[in-house]
């Protein structure tokens, strides 16, 4: 009995993988695993029906709490951002892959599989985690170089049908919504308004601004307007409120790991709000030296996540540094959400490095700065004196 565990999503790519793994690869048993990281309920329901019908064993794993705790929170602490992308899809892949490997071990499977094509980043992210196990890794769509048309034909031959054909390639979880493909592949194409599901257009956003207070402890958001909230509820709430105010839309050109550029659209209201607030609070409590150095750490952290290299020991080391800095990132940030913009309007922390003593209003001896000023720019002074 040859067994394989497939990272299943319910879409075309992963659905055709089930018969392919049997017919083409000769597996006797295909176990389909879908990992819930906050996909829309309807999608999970549809995926479950299809998965149960096609596979020999189907498992739905609710990983939302783990996703927020072990992936999103570290991302907030590290100000996760790659070229302006808040890493919504990227940050979820290692967790999905990890869960698939866990099932494979439990079930005594011989191999793990994913439905990614050979063009994107996701194949690399799944592979990197899969290959830390001793299981065989199979990527049928990539290995057989299937085109979209060939996939559709194979699906219909195997009685796999989809109610409505999706115009775009979508990926959604609690942190963000990623949209790519078809006409979007032309960078000059204007995306139609219907492409957006989480965010209102600026024109449709309410005139009245929303003001909110976000509380942070150790770099993690813990409360909203004074009420403590668990991460999942807080992020969902901010996605709703922020989306309504038109916050968190990105239309960008992105440098993929393989080197080519791609056009991407993202929606991420909560991410925009929380990352703005968190960065602002860090600016209040960390020294400028910490901030400069952390900037580089954050960028490196984000690149590793984008590339799917979270198993690199560097990643753990960077997290240790980030965690150390976050010990002082406690306090509250007031944000104003208005017509597509999330702006910090106030911040407060018991660990603020801000001192009133240097205020313009305090009468104080100012001559102490004279000596400093004399040597400030000393080297350029010498240079200019020679001219
Ligand atoms: N470009 C992004 C990334 O590599 C998002 C990919 C989204 N996938 C999708 N099927 N829409 O992380």
Image: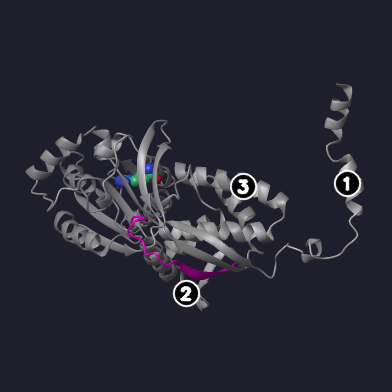
x, y percentage for residue 257? Answer: 43, 36
Q: Residues within 10 Å of mark 2 (few under 14, many from 20)?
A: some
Q: Dot 2 lies on which element? A: loop
For the residues labelled 3 and 2, the Cα–Cα distance comes to 28 Å
Name above or below for residue 348 compared with residue 46. below
Q: Residue at x 51, y 55 (%)?
A: 75
| Residue linked to disc 3 | 295
Q: Earlier in the sequence, mark 3 or mark 1?
A: 3
Left or right for 360, reference 179: right
Q: Which of the numbered marks, if any, corresponds to residue 372? A: 1
Corner quadrant of residue 137: top left
Which region shows up in magenta? 201-218
Q: Nearer the viewer, mark 3 or mark 1?
A: 1
| SS label for mark 3 | helix
Label 1, residues with CA under 10 Å away: few <14, some 14-19, many ≥20: few
* Residue located 37% across and 66% down the image: 240
Is the residue indicated by label 1 positioned so its CB lies within 8 Å of ligand 1?
no
Answer above or below: position of 354 versus 297.
Answer: below
Query: Any mark on residue 229, and which?
Result: 2
Q: Is residue 209 magenta?
A: yes
Residue 69 as seen in the image, left or right of residue 104: right
Does residue 126 appear anywhere in the picture?
no
Label pair 3/1, CB-CB below 8 angstroms: no
Relative side of 175 to 314, left or right: left
How far apart marks 3 and 1 lie (CA) works out to 27 Å
């Amino acid at each position: 009995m040859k067994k394989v565990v497939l990272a299943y999503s319910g879409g075309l790519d992963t659905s055709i993988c089930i018969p392919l793994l049997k017919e083409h690869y000769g597996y006797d048993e295909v176990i389909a695993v879908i990992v819930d990281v906050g996909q829309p309920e309807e999608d999970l329901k549809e995926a479950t029906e299809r998965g149960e019908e096609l596979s020999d064993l189907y498992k739905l794993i609710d990983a939302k709490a783990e996703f927020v705790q072990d992936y999103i929170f570290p991302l907030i602490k590290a100000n996760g951002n790659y070229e302006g992308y808040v890493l919504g899809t990227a940050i979820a892949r290692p967790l999905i892959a990890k869960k698939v490997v866990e099932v494979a071990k439990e079930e005594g499977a011989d191999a793990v599989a994913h439905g990614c094509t050979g063009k994107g980043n996701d194949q690399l992210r799944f592979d990197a985690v899969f290959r830390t196990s001793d299981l065989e890794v199979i990527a049928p769509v990539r290995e057989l170089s299937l085109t979209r048309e060939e996939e559709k034909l194979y699906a219909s031959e195997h009685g796999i049908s989809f109610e409505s054909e999706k115009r775009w390639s979508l990926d959604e979880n609690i942190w963000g919504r990623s949209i790519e493909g078809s006409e979007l592949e032309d960078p000059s194409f204007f995306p139609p308004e219907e492409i957006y599901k989480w965010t209102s257009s600026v024109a449709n956003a309410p005139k009245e601004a929303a003001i909110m207070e976000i509380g942070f402890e150790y770099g993690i958001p813990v409360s909203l307007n004074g009420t403590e909230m668990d991460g999942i509820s807080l992020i969902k709430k901010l996605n709703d409120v922020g989306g309504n105010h038109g916050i968190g839309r990105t239309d960008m050109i992105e440098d993929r790991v393989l080197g080519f550029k791609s056009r991407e659209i993202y929606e991420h209201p909560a991410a925009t709000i929380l990352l703005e607030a968190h960065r602002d609070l860090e600016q209040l409590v960390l020294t400028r030296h910490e901030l400069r150095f952390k900037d580089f750490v954050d960028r490196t952290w984000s690149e590793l996540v984008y590339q799917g290299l979270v198993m690199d020991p560097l990643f753990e080391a960077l997290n240790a540094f980030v965690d150390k800095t976050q010990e002082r990132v406690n306090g509250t940030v007031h944000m104003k959400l208005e017509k597509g913009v999330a702006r910090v309007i106030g911040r407060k922390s018991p660990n603020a490095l801000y001192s009133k003593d240097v205020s313009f209003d305090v009468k104080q001896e100012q001559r102490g700065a004279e000596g400093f000023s004399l040597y400030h720019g000393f080297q350029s002074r010498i240079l200019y004196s020679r001219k």
